[in-house]
Amino acid sequence: MTIPANRRRFLGLIATAPLGVAGASTAARAAQAVAPVSPTPVPPPAAVALTDDERRRLTDFPWLARYAEDNARITAAATPVKLVFMGDSITQGWPDKHPAFFAAEGRVCRGISGQTTPQMVLRMMADVIALKPRAVHIMAGTNDIAGNTGPMTLQQTQDNLAAMAMLAKASGIAVLLASVPPAARYYWRPGLDTVTPIAAINQWLASYAATHGHTFVDYHGAMQDGAGGMRPGLAYDGVHPTEAGYAVMEQVLSPILAAKGFS
């Protein structure tokens, strides 16, 4: 069969055309070398520097180890305990500023600086119930407001305070619920409104104590300056009491302890 001239020219062009990208055969494309990809190594995350307190929260959130040795000593010796003081730095600093008040027989301090009510709830069994006291003095809420272990609502603080009171009452331990002392500001949380939430917690504490047969101890009323802050001379930083501040607290508490038979 004779191939027309125009088709012969077309076939000739195909036969003599150079192989480009579009015209390369499948085999030729497969034969092309692929440059190896060198993955960029991902550097490990930088080590996070933790404070001692942050590290402790990761391993012992409520800090049960803080008083474990002393608790074991008390229980082993069957030492009679009249009153355990559960709280934060305001409670912890009390025997340091006024050791004579805690020299009274049967008074035990279980305050830990910076603690919030979620931490205290977890300490109740070891630091209070196991010691079999006649009464417990609970003063907490300052660090909840400050958000020391994270943001908290008023309801969450109330629930934790109620839980501690319930644990004590179920164990036959009388409950003294102390007001949150006044503070116009928290130096470690600048700009935070402290007056409003302190007032709300204290109002709830007074109501809860009256409803459930507990004793409300109102330090706030005796220490506040009329605007929600501490009276001059009663706190060295606006929050933590001076010796004079603790003296005022003792003037409020001592008659209550005497009336209840816990002095």
Image (cartoon, rainbow, N blue to C red):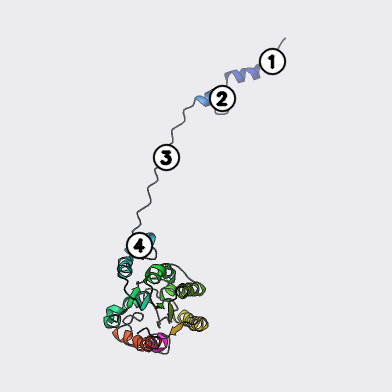
Return the residue at label 1.
Answer: 5
Q: Amino acid at mark 4?
A: Arg
Instruction: Tell me the quadrant of the picture where the N terminus can be found.
Output: top right
Q: Residues within 10 Å of mark 2 (few under 14, many from 20)?
A: few
Mark before the other along the chain sequence, 1 or 2:
1
Question: What residue is shown with label 2?
Answer: 26
Whether residues under marks 1 and 4 lie with C-beta atoms below 8 angstroms apart, the answer is no
The foreground one among 120 and 186 is 120
Quickly name the residue at label 4.
56
6 in the magenta segment: no
Q: Earlier in the sequence, mark 1 or mark 4?
A: 1
Please tell me whether mark 3 sits on a helix, a strand or a loop.
loop
Q: Nearer the viewer, mark 2 or mark 3?
A: 3
The answer to which of marks 3 and 1 sits earlier in the sequence is: 1
SS for tag 1? helix
Residue for point 35% across, 87% down: 254
Q: Is residue 119 above or below residue 258?
A: above
Q: Residue shown at 32%/63% (left/top)?
A: 52
- Please tell me whether mark 4 sits on a helix, a strand or a loop: helix
Residue at numbered disc 3: 39
* Residue range highlighted in magenta: 218-223
